[in-house]
Image (cartoon, coloured by chain):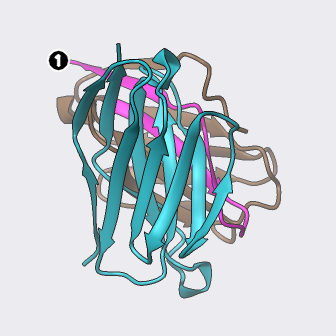
Amino acid sequence: SQTIHQWPATLVQPVGSPLSLECTVEGTSNPNLYWYRQAAGRGLQLLFYSVGIGQISSEVPQNLSASRPQDRQFILSSKKLLLSDSGFYLCAWRGLWFRGKETQYFGPGTRLLVL
Amino acid sequence: GESVGLHLPTLSVQEGDNSIINCAYSNSASDYFIWYKQESGKGPQFIIDIRSNMDKRQGQRVTVLLNKTVKHLSLQIAATQPGDSAVYFCAENTGGFKTIFGAGTRLFVKA
């Protein structure tokens, strides 16, 4: 069965510090991968998605970036964090649509607090 | 469409009653719909899905209804329990790489 991991679970960082959040998927190959951010009590905001190694699509212009160095690894980064980067970051994967696996499955999330 | 900046609407129900959570979707070309449940501090979890060639699908204590004429989706939870308290998101796929999520509804179950 497929599983998705995110770490760290919680992170407190000072303004201006760098960020690296990691997401890995097990039990599937060539998944579509997604990064979302969720503010407290709000909906899901799509940040980035990737359909293959080295391929990144950005949805929202910001000081965050994403990379996909391996098939089942997705990394969210920032060189300098802003206060507004605080939130709950969720990674998700989805299988190829023609296999009938169109559902996105989410990881446990990383709660980021920028002070 | 996406409504990430809005506060979540809430629904409060008595334990044992049935809950109905509604969602209006945006794209008439959407062909696959999903309901997710998100508990506090956790990632959203898949509950049930439905394809556009169906108008009803049942799971364990949950039923999803799809009305393509008015682009409306609903999730019915039978005999609501305290463990059902969570935020519920509807989502739609149009066949592309992205899934479009609704704003979410917070369900409170009163004991």
Q: Judge left or right: residue A86 versus residue A48.
A: left
Q: Which chain is cyan?
A: A
Magenta stretch holds residue B107 = yes
Question: What secondary structure is marked by label 1?
Answer: loop
Segment tinted magenta in the rendering = B86-111
Question: Magenta region's main secondary structure?
Answer: strand
| Residue drawn at the location 56% of the way across and 60% of the way down | B56
| x 23%, y 25%: residue | B15
Q: Identify which amino acid the numbered label 1 is placed on.
A: Ala
Regarding residue A14, the answer to whether it shows in the image is: yes
Magenta run includes residue B99: yes
Residue A12: x %, y % from top left: 26, 24
Chain B: drawing colour: brown
Q: Quadrant of residue A2?
A: bottom left
Seen in the image, is A61 located left or right of residue A75?
right
Who is closer to the viewer here, A35 or B83? Answer: A35
Residue at 37% in and 45% down: A20
Label 1 belongs to which residue? B111
Residue A67, percent across and down? 51, 60
Left or right, residue B59 beside residue B9: left
* Rendered position, B58 above or below A6: below
| Residue B18 in view (yes/no) | no
